Amino acid sequence: MSDPVNSSAASIDGQTPLSSDGAGTLSGDATGNLSADGTVMVDPDTGLAVDAMATTQSNGLVDGFTSLPVIEQVDRAGVVGWVLAAMALIGLLVFFYKLVGFLRRGIFADGFVKDVERHLSEGNEVQASEILARRRHPAARIGLSGLSLPVNSAQDREAASDLIAARARKEIDGLNGGLRVMSAIAVLSPLLGLLGTVMGMIEAFQRMEGAGSRIDPSVLSGGIWLALLTTAIGLVVAIPATAFHMWMQGVIGRAAAVMEDVCTLVINRGELAQKSAANVAGISGLRRAAE
């Protein structure tokens, strides 16, 4: 009579992959390919063993990212929520791009106008040129180019004024680059949020209509707060975008005023050197004299 066969041992041996020498032992590389019941996980498409540990780690990273409070709320808002999130990201990129551009152009360093005015009043154009050459402000570049233009007669001053004004407009246009994108985000984000709210309310009332007399208040309230979520996200995006847009407009307006002051000094530098401080008091007096 033959010996009874251990069914449990046979099943284990059948599920255990063989090594290169035919022994029924598990190799070190296969330990990460076992499922919860001890069997080897095999990809049905390729026939190769699947690394369960790597799959678990990758799924953990994705779940950890999607479980963030902000990402979770945006995901609940649906397509409109993700569009608003993309608009918020674009707004941040535009803001930091403009901020770096302002710093590189020296927009915030505009305290050189008084020194230029003092040297031009003394008739020392060389010192004024040296001050303007050391500055990165657009007004300094415009003023430095204006000092090379003749302003002896009224016709020369008019021609120089037109040329400097054209250069100033080009500089201001360069500073205004990107503001339309920020303005569009500030205007469109609350409208998109309102659109998402209206769509969510329509869906909630459709569910209530389909329920008939068996209306569940929790279903209605859940649909309403999910609908209002898009409006909240839209306002969260619109408020900082509006603030950034207004701030950048103020910075550009101040830079434009500095350009105007420097252009006035450069064009009227001949009169400024001749008149005394009692007759012409700074830039305001020059403007009245030019008019």
Image (spheres, rainbow, N blue to C red):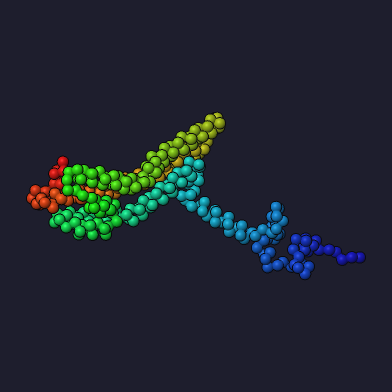
Which residue is drawn at the image coordinates 14% and 54% (left, top)? 121
* Residue 182 left/right relative to 60: left
Q: Nearer the viewer, residue 122 or 244?
A: 122
Q: Nearer the viewer, residue 32 or 46?
A: 46
Which residue is drawn at the image coordinates 20% and 59% (left, top)? 126
Residue extending furthest right?
Answer: 1
Which residue is drawn at the image coordinates 39% and 49% (left, top)? 94
Quarter placement of the N terminus: bottom right
Q: Image quarter for residue 32? A: bottom right
Task: Using the rendered image of the protein, determine whether residue 8 is visible from the camera's viewpoint.
Answer: no
Q: Nearer the viewer, residue 168 or 69?
A: 168
Which residue is drawn at the image coordinates 50% and 42% (left, top)? 78
* Residue 34 left/right relative to 24: left
Name the spot of residue 163 as percent of width and height, x first.
Answer: 26, 45
Q: Image quarter for residue 46? A: bottom right
Q: Is residue 65 above or below residue 211?
A: below
* Residue 85 left/right relative to 127: right
Residue extending furthest left?
Answer: 278
